[in-house]
Image (cartoon, coloured by chain):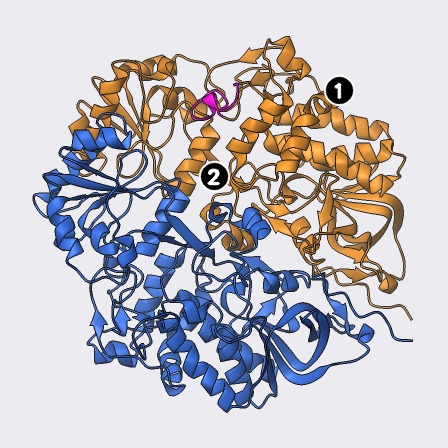
Chain colours: A orange, B blue
Amino acid sequence: MSQQPPRTDTVRPLRANTVEHWDIEVDVVVAGYGIAGVCAAIEAARAGANVLILERTGGWGGAAALAGGFIYLGGGTGLQRALGFDDTPENMATFLTAALGPGVDQAKIEDYCAGSVEHYEWLVACGVPFKAEFWGEPGWEPPHDEGLMYSGGENAAPFLDLAKPAPRGHVPQFAEKKIGRRSGGYMLMKPLAETAAGLGIAVEYDTRIRRLIVDDDDRVVGVLASTYGKPVAVRAARGVVLATGSFAYDTEMIARYTPKLSGRPGAAIEEHDGIGIRLAQALGAELAHMDASEVAVFGDPQLMARGILVNGRGQRFVTEDTYPGRIGQAVLLHQDNEAFLIIDEKSLEQALDTVTATPFFRFPPTWVAETVAELEAEMGLPAQALQTTIAAYNQHAEHGADPLLGKKPEWVRPLTGALACYDLRGFTAGFTLGGVRTDLDSRVLHVSGEPIAGLFAAGRCTSGLCAGGYVSGASLGDGSFYGRRAGKSAATG
Amino acid sequence: MSQQPPRTDTVRPLRANTVEHWDIEVDVVVAGYGIAGVCAAIEAARAGANVLILERTGGWGGAAALAGGFIYLGGGTGLQRALGFDDTPENMATFLTAALGPGVDQAKIEDYCAGSVEHYEWLVACGVPFKAEFWGEPGWEPPHDEGLMYSGGENAAPFLDLAKPAPRGHVPQFAEKKIGRRSGGYMLMKPLAETAAGLGIAVEYDTRIRRLIVDDDDRVVGVLASTYGKPVAVRAARGVVLATGSFAYDTEMIARYTPKLSGRPGAAIEEHDGIGIRLAQALGAELAHMDASEVAVFGDPQLMARGILVNGRGQRFVTEDTYPGRIGQAVLLHQDNEAFLIIDEKSLEQALDTVTATPFFRFPPTWVAETVAELEAEMGLPAQALQTTIAAYNQHAEHGADPLLGKKPEWVRPLTGALACYDLRGFTAGFTLGGVRTDLDSRVLHVSGEPIAGLFAAGRCTSGLCAGGYVSGASLGDGSFYGRRAGKSAATG
């Protein structure tokens, strides 16, 4: 008489000796066909492993294929050099340590920076196209198919003086006009998925990982998945790679770890339900930086750089010409999710004449006023709260200076005449950056400090480069970089 | 031939079938003899269990015995009523939900508030003395043996208008002058330790918990401890209670979860190394709010209420007459750990004439200046940064108002004449509030959502009432309250 099929509604590990029948047997199982998964699969296959990717949706791509496509690379990549930018791994590490902390995994930052040039070349060799053109304007992304851009505030205060500014946001070139799914992220995933297919890597779509299967020594030896409600036991002779993404869409985990993101997931997909993290936790995995969040603010950087941002008390709080994701974090995490963008008519006109990748952020202002006092009243601020802010800003702006926050002179001009104000309160969304702790070989670390045998992870189900801060391209960056490591480690395991 | 003794240098669980010899056999083992541990032990013993407390130091007390002694209680306790303060569980829950969030465990808040009056009576019945005297001045603690005080900003903006203000910081009465260890916390622990002794509860001092022992069904059935380097296997027929405190002194966990506290532990003891959390994680326990931190700022509340606090940009950012721990969190978590306290000569003299529990915070000012412009320059602020702040503050203060932050009229007066400024940059310290997730019966929850059989926890190794914010007394409060639950649950398990 046959046993009951194993439960698929718990994240508790399943004992291998209870598995009656293995539906599939391979060397390496990769859960999730996004950026970390595809890179893991490619490297595992190249290391000689028989690889199977399990993907719960009907196609490859994950959140990566929908992303803008920044990959954070530097230290002197071919693209940086072709465009005349000097950079070194040390310079890059100095910047990232400051921008992504406090609390960064220093060994990981240094390892990532040291391997960045090689990783760029690996992506190019896989067919990822980068156009040798630099976009130097403020923006969330390049508006066309430019391949390189500042994407972390490298050329803005306070980092400007800490490390030599170098743009490191590498964007795959769009093959066609930017319509629908044909984003830079799609153009990253497509050649990688083709590379994987060329290596004969098998994929089971519509197949969702449910539990890890462990032997009597607690080594991970397979996964229990499900497809259309049917359990599938997959034996992984060498290792399992978790590449299942963030927990941005798990409302309970969000409430427990990153409550400020409650109700405002962004730049993630609904499949990002934290399953990989929970499966690893059930085996005693250590976590890190579960509160860390990427945060986008729905403002156009060309307008923000030319105006001033004030908080709910009418005070400036962030260098307006920095990476807009840094502004988003400042607003949500430190200013009670309250911000107003104020810009004068002349600067607004100039800003609206520029090219932008985010025209949908160019909505009409909330208020227009002839005087600061009038605007202050419209905004509901106490008398003098805004007037004093603008008077102090203007006094220094007359001399092209911003001693309070260090905005660069090119963006500093007194606010005069009629003023427009955008009410950006509550205008943020983001995704989570915390996850399981891994070592440089992408081995999942047990809370004892030792690796969990047979278990590897990469991408946003891990705590990668970012401890608190963020730069655009860090997720596709550490996901692809440590995805490769995970694949190699699992294959040679 | 005898086996090797089990390793004590890993947090991995030990299998019961490998234990050759049980050194001690009891019903309930409680790890840690602080506030949560003593309450757990008392209730377990009263429920009929044979209880053993393991304590790694040479005496009872934990961090509790060194604490000021606030226990956050309300909803109409005998002490509140005796002193003429109205409160209800609902009113208390409204306040705590706002003050301790976002992301609070709502069921736990409501449960705690509903049980608060009974818990007060339980403590009194155990011999904890509360003097029916109210201290209404700003301060970190009552300066003498007063029994009740505001300890969470209940009577300050923004909470003032959200819930009816009621003081809930209950402080055990000092038996003698406040010297050495005879703090309110000591006077809480002493009668409880005596109650435990009266119940015949056994204690092994100098005995440190190392590993949990689990049976083949992963039920916790004991602990492996060590004393003077020798392993001790203790069988717990009914359950194990973890009451081992926070992770404030584990530098690696701090870097991974609460990096802003790195190098600045406060109001904790070196034994708070996170061991309870790690032992539970090794069994798949869920965590919550690992980034949450209590933060103290080294400023005297009598001075802060009468002056203004500005950040590193010369801007006000927090209601100066609120709970000083709220100020500490604002400074460390949101203002880059930068704050300056500015007060004029007349208000400083008034403040220094008051009684304080923290005379060591009344050090000489960093700068004294005749004018705001002069002080601004001394502080290294850009021209106008401070002048505009004080001009705007004074304009409203003339009318006794603070529309920017809502400081109460009694503390609002224009800053005039010579000014003193205290440089409080870096003047913070704190302890961690995150830990394992528990249910209302103090059962440790597995990441699957189910309880881990045989395992209970309370106190600062758990995520209790506080998700982000803090009120003084929350730790002795939820530690004692859910410590009792843990003991009851373990005994009846």
| Numbered range of the magenta stretch | A153-164
Q: Quadrant of residue A51?
A: top right
Q: Amino acid at mark 2?
A: Ala
Assign the C terminus of chain B to one quadrant of the image. bottom right
Q: Which mark is residue B460?
A: none
- In this rendered view, identify the residue nearer to me: A386 or B189: B189
Name the kind of residue labelled 1 in the image: Gly
Q: Position of residue B334 (x, y in %)?
A: 39, 43
In the image, residue A373 above or below residue A8:
above
Visible residue check, residue A131: no
Left or right of residue A281: residue A94: left
Q: What residue does disc 1 label?
A: A127
Residue at 33% from the left image edge and 53% from the top image edge: B326
Whether residue B26 sits left or right of residue A264 in the image: it is: right
Is-magenta flag for residue A456?
A: no
- Ranked by sequence position, the earlier of labels 1 and 2 is 1
Q: CA distance from mark 1 to mark 2?
A: 32 Å
Picture coordinates of residue A104, whole percent (x, y): 57, 39
Near-viewer residue (B478 or A196) = B478
Report the residue marked by disc 2: A429
The x, y position of residue B64, in whole percent, is 44, 70
Q: Quadrant of the N terminus of chain B?
A: bottom right
Q: Residue A464, relative to residue A291: is it above or below?
A: above
Predominant secondary structure in magenta? loop
Q: Is residue B361 left or right of residue A63?
A: left
What kind of element bears circle 1?
loop
